[in-house]
Amino acid sequence: MARAAASLPSLALSRGSLDRHGELRGDPGLLASLLDDPTTRVLELVDGRTAVTEEDGGRVRLGYRSPVPEDRDRFTAYLGHAPTGGAAYVLSVAHDGSATGGTSAPGGDAPQRQGLRGVGARLDDLDAGVLTTATGLANWHGRHGFCPLCGSPTTPAQSGWIRVCPADGSEHYPRTDPAVIMSVVDENDRLLLARGVGFAAQGMSVLAGFVEPGESLSAAVAREVHEEVGVRVTDVTYLGDQPWPFPSSLMIGFTARAVSTELVLQQDEIEEARWFEREELARAVADGSLRISGRISIARRLIEHWYGEELDAPEASLRA
């Protein structure tokens, strides 16, 4: 079984302070009343991106707006309220060409729009929670428009938190897929990194994989590591977790001790894997021969947890 340990502090997408007020969702008039209230803060998503404002010091603010008539013809969802009885937050999903407002870019032209991957690590706690929740809900509704039992189109209900099939009456709830992600360290305190299929030539990260039916989290860690690189592990220890709505995962972070070090790669999953000492990893990051995950990800925090401090690495996608 996994052993308890102190969680990784300040994971970018785990800091949300939004009060979800789940007890309000069943009110059939909730969204209509919120869209009639000019103090409601609407987060408009267009293809997963929303208006943002860049501030001094690198901080980013989400470009909320008041409700507009167009919201009534879109998918909307109640996200929650700000802490201590603050404003209500509502998601409104628009399509290209139908955006209705947001923060202007320099020069006063179209709004600057960014997705959660681009700005999640630079948001405050409230905005991080709002955008993470909104992204996850929008992704789920966009992929689950039909009943898995009978194939009929479903409709949103519970203020955007479920879908209902009008043909058979079944209710369907947002899905979250648990995935384990782990730093594997050998007896010489070296860290294992791997480049997955489709990664950029310089891109490497810690291993990860989905939890299978009937499997514990620690068993999933051991299975994934052995399947992907042929290494056996023990001492699986929990370090932290964060939502990862791309489209619908919960990333659960661990560290584990390797009891073997010979690497046998799963050819359809892993292109390269290697053990790193700390100085070796730092040099590779500094000279650009190694590209690691961005600060929004728990993968980056697991690497830095092993390294012992933050790494000065550019924000870049690992994908080719």
Image: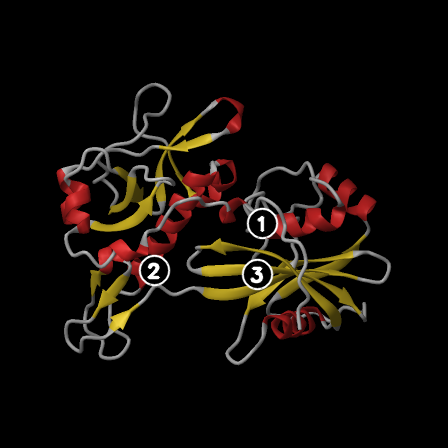
Report how far apart the C-alphas of labels 3 and 2 lie in the structure.
Answer: 20 Å
Q: Is residue 11 above or below residue 257?
A: above
Q: Tell me which amino acid carries mark 3.
A: Ile
Q: Is residue 249 above or below residue 201?
A: below
Residue 107: x %, y % from top left = 34, 18
The quadrant of the rendering that contains the N terminus is bottom right
Instruction: State which mark lies toward you, 3 or 2.
Output: 3
Q: Tell me which amino acid carries mark 1.
A: Leu
Q: Say which quarter of the image contains residue 310.
A: top right
Residue 137: x %, y % from top left = 34, 55
Quickly name the residue at label 2: 140
- Given the current orientation, which residue lies at the most extreme front position? 84
Pick the residue in front: 10 or 146.
10
Q: Earlier in the sequence, mark 1 or mark 3?
A: 3
Q: Is residue 176 above or below residue 115?
A: below
Quickly name the residue at label 1: 318
**1 and 3 marks in contact (CB < 8 Å):** no
Name the secondary structure under disc 3: strand
Q: Earlier in the sequence, mark 2 or mark 1?
A: 2
Name the secondary structure under disc 2: helix
**2 and 1 marks in contact (CB < 8 Å):** no
Quickly name the residue at label 3: 252
Q: Say which quarter of the image contains residue 115.
A: top left
Is 31 left or right of 47, judged from the image as shown? left
